[in-house]
Amino acid sequence: MADFKKGLYSCQITGQELTESKAGNPQICLRLTVNEFMHQDGTRTRFEEPKTRRVWLTITENTVDWVARDMSHLGFHGKP
């Protein structure tokens, strides 16, 4: 497993599904291929071999705003 440093990455979404957390809350699961690290100066470092990861965004009353914000960066403009 690659060690990712804090920052922005260029990724491709390769899959998604709506699941349920262990606590019973709805959550969005995204399967990603991580291609590049995006540096603050605008340059990018491409991985020799893309890395795959999964991200779970659990939707609760306390998280709905940041889930909506994160999803808007991916082009979703509805309301979770």
Image (cartoon, rainbow, N blue to C red):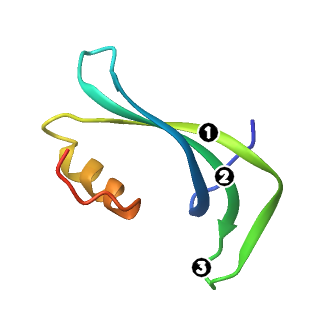
| Residue located beneath label 2 in the image | 34
Image coordinates of residue 78 in percent, x first then y, are 20, 54
Q: Where is residue 11 in the image (x, y as percent from the top left)?
A: 60, 56
Q: What residue is shown at x 35% (from left), y 55% (from top)?
A: 70
**Labelled disc at residue 40:** 3
Q: Do the residues labelled 3 and 2 touch (CB within 8 Å)?
A: no
Provide the secondary structure element on which disc 2 rests: strand
Q: Circle 3 — which element?
A: loop
Image depth: mark 1 or mark 3 in front: 1
Sequence-wise, the earlier of marks 1 and 3 is 3
Q: Where does the N terminus fall, quadrant-wise?
A: top right
Q: Residue at x 31, y 57 (%)?
A: 76
Query: What residue appears at the point 68 percent right and 64 percent down from the top-left corner?
Result: 37
Q: Quadrant of residue 62?
A: top left
Instruction: State how many labels appear.
Output: 3
Marks 1 and 2 close (CB-CB < 8 Å): yes
80 relative to 13 in the view: left or right = left
Q: Which of marks 3 and 2 is nearer the N terminus?
A: 2
* In front of the other: 34 or 39: 34
User: Which residue shows up at 38% across the image and 63% down it?
Assistant: 73
Q: Mark 1 points at which residue?
A: 53
Q: Distance between the Cα atoms at labels 3 and 2?
A: 17 Å
Q: What residue type is labelled 3?
A: Gln
Q: How many angstroms separate mark 1 from mark 2 (CA)?
A: 7 Å
Q: Tell me where residue 79 appears, x and y as whole percent.
A: 17, 50
